[in-house]
Image (cartoon, rainbow, N blue to C red):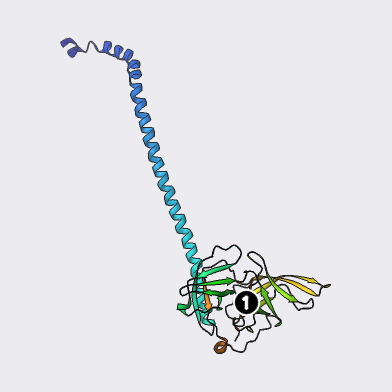
């Protein structure tokens, strides 16, 4: 031991023995190394899964926030348009919000958050900045049921903005175009004509856009015309609208239809929704 300590005589022997035993040591350490590698793999995999789940949850939250932001922008724009409409209408209005659609596959109706307690009356029209949406048909203290234009056999007295021809628009059920009924073949109607409320029924104020003629089928043999229309206002798009508290005894005024075919307050024909029509006095 002294000689080895002093002169390092056993170093060659020790190196040779180490070289011979190195493979055996490596084989003996394989189970431990495999266990450590497996543990590290599953630990890393579990960490990545947790991080991935957290990132997916965050992505879903950001997507929801983005959708909500877009919804709020659209809602804000609609409210601004309704505020502009309120300034144009010369009689009282009441802001309303659509709560839900009753579970009735036959009728096309909605429920709003205003009722008799808020001054709403049965028969009051409901409109937005584009035109008439419907009419209050059932009244409660804090809510009301509104029949939309598309509701079957729902009728609105109208006149053609271009020439003043009077008629009535009828609903034909969910998803079906509106109809102008009981018109002769010789009626002066054209595709694209804007139909506005005539005001002769005492329910709807005159000059509000109702529909636009989309198709005309003339039957000469029966001397009748099948006229189909699309609503001027998107009846299933926004949640905010205006209830028009119209009383013909106090609010009715002389009306005149412009030759250009523009409709009354708050009414805009499709294709010209960026240009507000001139209000009827």
Residue 86 in the image, given as x and y percentages of width and height: 51, 80
Q: Which residue lies furthest to the left in this view?
A: 2
**Circle count:** 1
Q: Is residue 139 above or below residue 24?
A: below
Residue in the foreground of this view, choosing between 193 and 5: 193
Question: In what quadrant of the picture does the N terminus appear?
Answer: top left
Q: Can residue 129 be seen in this view?
A: no
In terms of image quadrants, where is residue 19?
top left
Relative side of 268 to 32, left or right = right
Q: Residue at x 48, y 59 (%)?
A: 67
Q: Name the residue under label 1.
A: 209
In the rendering, at what x and y percent does residue 172 appear? 66, 68
- Residue 9 horizontal/vertical position (percent): 22, 10
Question: In the picture provided, is 112 more to the left or to the right than 202?
Answer: left
Residue at x 23%, y 11% (from the top left corner): 10
> Is 18 or 88 nearer to us in this picture?
88
Q: Which residue is drawn at 57% across and 86% down?
A: 248
Q: In this view, does 141 lie above or below 30?
A: below
Badge 1 marks a residue whose secondary structure is strand
């Amino acid at each position: 031991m002294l000689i080895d300590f002093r002169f390092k005589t056993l170093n060659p022997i020790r190196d040779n023995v180490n070289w011979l035993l190195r493979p055996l040591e490596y084989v003996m350490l394989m189970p431990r190394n495999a266990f450590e590698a497996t543990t590290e793999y599953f630990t890393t995999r579990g960490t990545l899964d947790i991080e991935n789940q957290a990132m997916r949850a965050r992505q879903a939250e950001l997507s929801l926030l983005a959708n909500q932001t877009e919804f709020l922008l659209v809602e804000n724009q609609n409210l601004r348009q309704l505020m502009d409409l309120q300034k144009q209408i010369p009689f009282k209005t009441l802001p309303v919000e659509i709560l839900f659609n009753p579970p009735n596959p036959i009728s096309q109706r909605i429920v709003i958050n205003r009722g008799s307690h808020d001054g709403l009356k049965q028969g009051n029209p409901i409109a937005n900045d584009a035109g008439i949406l419907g009419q209050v048909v059932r009244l409660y203290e804090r809510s009301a049921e509104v029949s939309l234009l598309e509701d079957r056999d729902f009728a609105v007295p109208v006149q053609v903005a271009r020439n003043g021809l009077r008629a009535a628009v009828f609903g034909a059920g969910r998803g079906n175009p509106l109809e102008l009924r009981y018109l002769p073949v010789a009626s002066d109607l054209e595709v694209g004509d804007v139909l506005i409320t005539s005001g002769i029924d005492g329910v709807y104020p005159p000059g509000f856009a109702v529909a636009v003629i989309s198709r005309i089928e003339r039957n000469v043999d029966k001397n009748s015309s099948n006229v189909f229309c699309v609503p001027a206002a998107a009846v299933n798009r926004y949640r905010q609208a205006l209830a028009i508290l119209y009383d013909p005894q106090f609010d009715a005024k002389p009306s005149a239809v412009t030759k250009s075919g523009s409709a009354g307050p708050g009414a805009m024909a499709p294709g010209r929704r960026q240009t507000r029509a001139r209000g009827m006095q």
